[in-house]
Amino acid sequence: MDDKPTNKPDLPESMNLDSPAQAGGGSGEEDFARMFADSLESSGEGQVIHGKVIKVLKEFLAVDINKKSEGMLPLEDLTEEERSSIGPGDPIEVMTEGYDQAQGFIRLSRSKVVKIRVWDDLQKSFDEGTPVQGAIVAKVKGGYTVDIGVKAFLPGSQVDLRPVRDSDPVIGIQGKFKILKFSRKKTNVVVSRRAFLEEAREEQRKGLLDHIQEGDTVEARVKNITDYGVFMDLGGLDGLMHVTDMSYGKVGHPSDVCKVGDLLKVKVIRFDRERGRISLGLKQTKSDPWLDLEARYRPGMRVRGRVTNTTKYGAFVELEEGVEGLLHISEMSWSKRLKDPSELMKAGDRIEVEVLKVDRANKKVSLGYKQLQSNPWDDLKARHPEGSVVEGVVKNIAEFGLFIDIGGEIDGLVHVSDLSWNTRVKSPSDLFKKGDRIQAKVLKIDPENQKFSLGIKQTGEDPWTGIEKRFRKGDLLTGKVTRVADFGAFVEIAEGVEGLVHVSEISREKIESPAAVLKAGDEVGAVVLGVDRVNKKVSLSIRGYQEELDRKNMESYLGKPSDPSNESIGALGEALLAKLKPNGDQGA
């Protein structure tokens, strides 16, 4: 006969009822087997027993439970950790689930014992008010599911000390929870993480109040950021770090230095124990960079920095945290007249500068930018010394003069007064236009005031040179009226040379104004009253000329020989005298 397969598990020989030891040939053996089975069935269900592992089988653990037969515990009812570590002789707590007559053994459960113990522990924690360990595993309506050995409900308001708006970071949080409600019968548990955090916070607060001192360096977490500073959690106590205590440098906004959640080492600056107010500082954890600044930054050094701000008068450059220097607009360029530093640089630019001066007492550093470039003024003085003649192109025309491009970075200026010796120029545009090529003499190079002065008229001879020899006091001369003003008339006595006839020197008679008797273009005779070459002034007198003419006529009348050269002067004087007589009266 073929062997029939059996579904019975691989049991220890002592439990195999089909073994020769258990299977007899007579009715007595059958009665014994029945009685044995009945005794096993009477073992019942739900008993928690402390047993001992006899043998580890393929799918079961054989466990000695102090019964007439050993129990069988499925390996799958154990945790993975228990399966990997358990062995013969190890104690184990199990629950009986009754006798399996088909298989011929007492069924055991380990997971039910674990659940019972979990509920026992939870009951104890609830009664004593102690926290339990757990993990938030899922989002549900109104809150979250927490695994504390059993599934518990965590209301959304009980997740943290502050309201939680984003649920994603919450899932997976592990920690301790307080049991708020507990019903073993209904398998209902409500927990709070917030309650545990509040208790822990209060304990920390008491400890901090007892031990914290001014000057301590502590760790604190950023809770909230405002325009004026940062509120920080020291673990039970809140402290304020003012924006002025965040850095030795300028801080535009506290959020530029830290963000919510950051853990920082800060120093306790002030502590009002009675009011529980704490002032914190981040910069105080570092040394003041200005203390040994003069050793690190010396005049003449070239350093790199970052432009933090620009103003109309210059730019501020951060050399290191807490140290800013001023780059004045006058130190930015040798030749360009900048209206605003933003023409060269902007906030955020990294530039190289030269240290000009360090004033540690007043926390000031003066910087230079142009010093890193060749000085075009030095080159200009070398190529075009004062007195040399240059050639260039009219680049721009203004009311006060011409700007001349002679090549290079620096343009020269010809002032309107240096355009001509003998022409009074009202506007430079009357004589020149853009693009005209001209020659001019270098009059002055002034790097300090950034002035490069040229002269066009100086390329010719100055008509005032030797003027004191050409015209002496008492000389009689003739000239042409060029302009008439309220105070007198200007008379051209040589090319490029004008003399002034004051109103009091025009006529021996009283006149209302020079314009009543003279106009531009009139030929007049005058006597030289004085010559001032330095100030380029010649004083003339028409009245004196007439008096001299009268004297000469008197000498001629008295029989003194006349000077033939004076005949023409005499005729001119007669005509002028007739013109200057009031009301046209030409009588002697």
Image (spheres, helix red, strand yellow):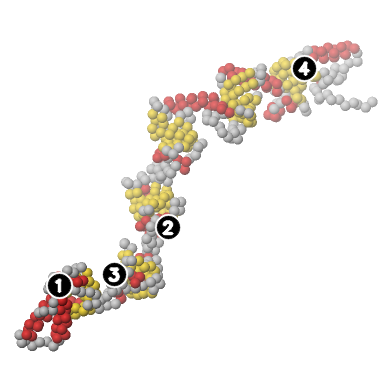
Measure the alpha-carbon separation of dots 2 and 4. Answer: 93 Å
Q: Which callout, 3 or 2, points at the residue further toward the start of the chain? A: 2
Whole-percent x, y for residue 221 in the image? 49, 34
Whole-percent x, y for residue 524 in the image? 19, 78
SS for dot 4: strand
Query: Residue flagged by tag 3: what amino acid is it?
Result: Ser
Q: Nearer the viewer, mark 1 or mark 3?
A: 1
Task: Tell me the residue that label 3 is attached to.
Answer: 417
Measure the alpha-carbon separation of dots 2 and 1. Answer: 61 Å
Task: Tell me the residue that label 2 is attached to.
Answer: 344
Task: Tell me the residue that label 4 is attached to.
Answer: 98
Q: Which callout, 1 or 3, points at the residue further toward the start of the chain? A: 3
Q: Answer few, some or many: residues within 10 Å of disc 2's Cα (few below 14, many 20 plus, some between 14 and 19).
A: few
Query: Residue flagged by tag 2: what amino acid is it?
Result: Leu
Q: Which callout, 2 or 4, points at the residue further toward the start of the chain? A: 4
Q: Which callout, 4 or 3, points at the residue further toward the start of the chain? A: 4
Q: Which callout, 4 or 1, points at the residue further toward the start of the chain? A: 4
Q: Is residue 400 visible?
A: yes
Q: Residue at x 67, y 21 (%)?
A: 115
**Marks 4 & 3, CB-CB < 8 Å contact:** no
Q: Is residue 220 visible?
A: no
Query: Residue flagged by tag 1: what amino acid is it?
Result: Glu
Q: Which callout, 2 or 1, points at the residue further toward the start of the chain? A: 2
Q: Which mark is residue 505?
A: 1
Horizontal arrangement in the rendering, residue 383 relative to residue 92 (left or right): left
Residue 76, quarter of the rendered image: top right
